[in-house]
């Protein structure tokens, strides 16, 4: 190659290398994660979401509730005999339902949270959080590295949510911390400072159980106010029972369980005219098998 050809060629090589180096040093923008947890998306938008409580292992009951209009289902494993096998079967039987599966685990242990997430829970609800350590454990076991220490293994999460589940799980998981005692309220500021918490839930029943005060009493309401103020100051969503849906600042609600819903449904059914309860004309019985399950 002639000398006068070598100089331009060398300059071109230097320019290409410099551009490649400069591009490598520029921060790479992360692609937006695929969000399939519609309940979490609504929370991020500041909307209220509601979840009926599931205590029965009946998949038909689960599916009826999952398609009734709720944003998520509060699957109760702290105060029920439900097993992880029961819950896995229920979630799989109604895969694709509108309501997202959230599980209240018995405790913030690796075993409980690992099983719950592997079988498809998109929300982990942890009861009786009194300490920073327990709040940290909830996030730690619910999230994959680098945000947590969740182990990657087998589970039905892949068929439920897609081949990219490992890459999208953290962005779709909702971690709910329940403050239920005066000790938890006292530590609320420290608890709310833990990264990765999406919701802090003011537990109406146990705040009374552990404090000895009733709703409406000054001492009780001061506990709720403390949880309310600290949670919102840290940009975390605030949860409570459905009865508190008109309280300012609350956006995440636990609705009643199957027994209460059946009673309410029966009352509505008995109070309506036949045409409003499934019959096209008064006095005409609905066709069996025609109603959605």
Image: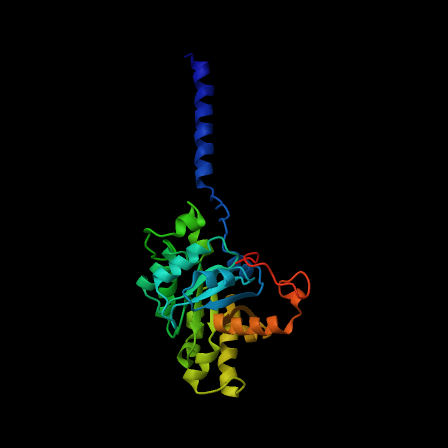
Q: Position of residue 56 (x, y in %)?
A: 42, 67
40 is higher (above) or lower (below) than 179: above
Position of residue 255 in the picture relative to residue 142 (left or right): right
Q: Residue at x 52, y 71 (%)?
A: 262
Position of residue 159 in the picture relative to residue 272 (left or right): left
Q: Residue furthest top?
A: 2
217 is higher (above) or lower (below) than 15: below
Q: Could you say which is closer to the camera, residue 87 or residue 211?
A: 87
Q: Is residue 124 visible to us here?
A: no
Q: Quadrant of the N terminus?
A: top left
Q: Residue furthest right?
A: 281
- How was the colour assigned to the protein in this rendering? rainbow
Q: Residue at x 42, y 53 (%)?
A: 169
When asked about the image quadrant of residue 196, the answer is bottom left
Q: Could you say which is closer to the camera, residue 209 or residue 171?
A: 209
Q: Position of residue 76 (x, y in %)?
A: 42, 68
Q: Position of residue 27 (x, y in %)?
A: 47, 44
Q: Is residue 287 visible to us here?
A: yes
Q: Could you say which is closer to the camera, residue 149 or residue 242?
A: 242
287 is higher (above) or lower (below) than 201: above
- How many numbered circles does the render carry? 0
293 is higher (above) or lower (below) than 206: above
Q: Position of residue 160 (x, y in %)?
A: 43, 51
């Amino acid at each position: 190659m002639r000398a006068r050809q070598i100089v331009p060629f060398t300059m071109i090589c230097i320019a290409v290398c410099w551009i490649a180096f400069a591009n490598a040093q520029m921060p790479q923008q992360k692609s937006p994660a695929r969000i399939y947890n519609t309940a979490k998306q609504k929370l991020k938008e500041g909307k209220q979401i509601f979840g009926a409580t599931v205590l029965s292992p009946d998949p038909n009951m689960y599916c009826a509730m999952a398609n009734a209009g709720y944003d998520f289902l509060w699957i109760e494993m702290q105060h029920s005999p439900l097993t992880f096998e029961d819950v896995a079967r229920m979630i799989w039987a109604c895969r694709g339902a509108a309501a997202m599966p959230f599980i209240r685990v018995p405790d913030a242990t690796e075993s409980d949270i690992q099983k719950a997430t592997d079988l498809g829970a998109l929300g982990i609800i942890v009861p009786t959080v009194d300490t920073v350590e327990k709040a940290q454990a909830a996030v730690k076991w619910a999230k994959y590295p680098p945000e947590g220490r969740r182990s990657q293994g087998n589970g039905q999460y892949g068929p439920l949510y897609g081949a990219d589940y490992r890459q999208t799980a953290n962005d779709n998981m909702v971690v709910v911390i329940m403050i239920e005692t005066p000790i938890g309220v006292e530590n609320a500021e420290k608890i709310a400072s833990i990264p990765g918490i999406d919701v802090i839930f003011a537990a109406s029943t146990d705040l009374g159980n552990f404090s000895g005060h009733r709703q409406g009493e000054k001492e009780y309401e001061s506990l709720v106010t403390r949880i309310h103020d600290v949670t919102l100051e840290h940009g975390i969503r605030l949860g409570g029972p459905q009865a508190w849906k008109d309280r300012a600042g609350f956006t995440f609600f636990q609705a009643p369980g199957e027994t209460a819903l059946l009673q309410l449904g029966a009352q509505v059914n008995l109070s309506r005219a036949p045409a409003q309860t499934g019959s096209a004309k008064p006095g005409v019985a609905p066709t069996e098998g025609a109603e959605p399950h």
